[in-house]
Image: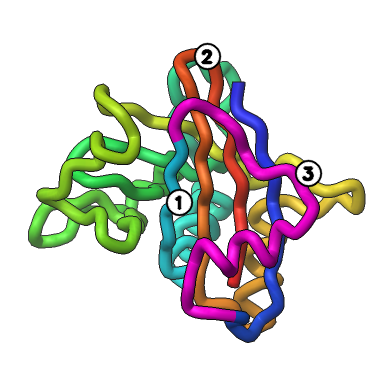
Amino acid sequence: MTQNNPTTAPAEPVTEDLDALISEILGGTTEPTGDHAATLTFPLDQVLAAAEHAAAAPHHKLGYGEAEALPRLWWVKDDGTYLMSNGKNPADTRTEDGPAPHVVRAKGWGPGTDARSILGGDDFRQSIELTTPLFDDGTTLLGMLREAAADGATRFVMKAAFDDEHMELTYITA
C-alpha cells in the first residue's frame, strides 16, 4: 500500500540544503517512516510535461495489479530511477538514443547509475495517481504540479520511505 503526503513549498527556495528545505516545509507534519528512505529531486517542468502527457493521452498502460486505466506517473527503478507517463499515444516515438518519451530522470540517478544503493535490490515500478484528490479541497497531484509551476517552483521532490510491507511517498514542490 502506498500513502501520499503532498506538500507545496513557497515559490522562492528557502535554502539550497534539500534536507533542511524538506524539514522546513514539512514542519510538524508526519514524514514518511520505514526501514529505508530516499529523497529524489526532479525538474518540475519535465515532471509536469510527463503528467500532462498522461492526462491528455487517449489510452493508458496498466501497472501491476491495476484494473482501471487512469492517468498516472510511474516511478521506475531499473537503469537509474525516473518518472514516466503511462499514457499511450500513437504519435509517441522513442528518441534517437532509445529512451521512451516523457521520461524524467531523478537528479544524479540517470542511466548507468545503480539506484540499489538507495532503493534496495530488485527493479520496480510504482504507480502514482494524477487525478485522485490528495487534499480535502479536491486538489490532485496534477493540480498541485500545475499550481507549483505557475507559482515559479522549479523542483519536484519525492521522499519515499519503505520496508518489505509498504511504501509511503511524500511530494514536495519548491
Q: CA distance from mark 2 to mark 3?
A: 24 Å
Residues rendered magenta in the picture: 15-36
Q: Could you tell whether 43 is left or right of 31 in the image?
A: left
Q: Secondary structure at mark 2?
A: loop
Residue behind mark 1: 39
Find residue 25 and report its horizontal and vertical position in percent: 69, 64
Q: Label 2 amino acid?
A: Glu
Q: Label 1 amino acid?
A: Thr
Nearer-N-terminus badge (2/3): 3
Nearer-N-terminus badge (2/1): 1
Q: Residue, x 25% and y 50% (percent of image)?
A: 100
Taking 116 as reference, is 62 above or below it?
A: above
Quarter in which the C terminus is drawn:
bottom right
Find residue 150 and report its horizontal and vertical position in percent: 66, 80
User: Are discs 1 and 3 less than 8 Å apart at CB?
Assistant: no
Q: Residue, x 66% and y 32% (percent of image)?
A: 3
Q: Secondary structure at mark 1?
A: strand
Magenta-span inclusion, residue 51: no
Residue behind mark 3: 133
Of badges 1 and 3, the one in the foreground is 1
**How packed is label 3: few (under 14 Cα within 10 Å), some, or many (20 or more)?**
some
Q: Could you tell whether 81 is left or right of 56 in the image?
A: left
